[in-house]
Image: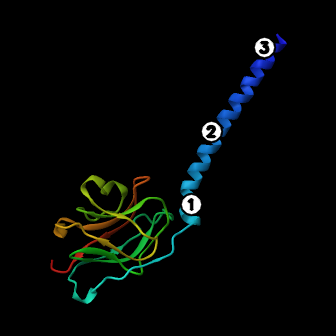
Amino acid sequence: MAEADKAASKWVAIGSFLVGSTIGLSAGIAVGLFIFPYVFQPPPAMEKVANRAAKTVVAKATFIHANPSDPVHYGKGSATVFTDLVHLEKNFEVGPGPKYHVFLSPRAPVTKTEDFDESKALDLGPIKAFEGSQNYPLPPGTKLASYQSIVIWCKAFGVLISPATLEFANR
């Protein structure tokens, strides 16, 4: 009976080790995903618009902090939409996080996560930095009149970070 108790005790210890290791590894990965963007932020972007004076401004927008009670998901600054690109101005800033993308949305205002439908929006790509000026070329044939907002969206967690309603120059 003592041999059986030793064997059972050994398997309980191995099982406990495996369960503890799995929980610890999972928690470490989750914390790493959350903390990594805060600790290792990319430098601010400083992209310029080539031939800016010759381009036609279609719309302007100002990013807002959609949920002031959420200190993590915020945005501020402005954007200019030209016929061929969206330019986030040098005063653009969002709180850091994983897999942020810039979208054009057919809806306005977008003030909460439920207002945004990723399947109906145009994904312009991942943000290049959490602050600073950035260019996002528009795909050929984009009909800007079909869109009403620029949205910074977290694809990893499906969370609204910051919206900006477009103010068209000729409307």
Q: Amino acid at mark 3?
A: Ala
Query: Residue 164 in the image: x percent, y percent?
Result: 32, 70
Q: Earlier in the sequence, mark 3 or mark 2?
A: 3
Q: Residue at x 31, y 57 (%)?
A: 116
Circle 2 SS class: helix
Q: Amino acid at mark 1?
A: Phe
Compared across the picture, whether 31 is left or right of 103 comes to right
Q: Which mark is residue 61?
A: none
Compared across the picture, whether 39 is left or right of 10 comes to left
Residues tagged 3 and 2 counted as in contact (Cβ below 8 A)? no
Residue sitting at the far bottom: 53
Query: Residue 100 in the image: x percent, y percent?
Result: 42, 62
Q: Which mark is residue 36?
A: 1
Query: Residue 2 in the image: x percent, y percent?
Result: 84, 13
In the picture of the structure, the residue carrying the numbered disc 3 is 4
Residue sitting at the far top: 1
In the picture of the structure, the residue carrying the numbered disc 2 is 22
Q: Residues within 10 Å of mark 1 (few under 14, many from 20)?
A: few
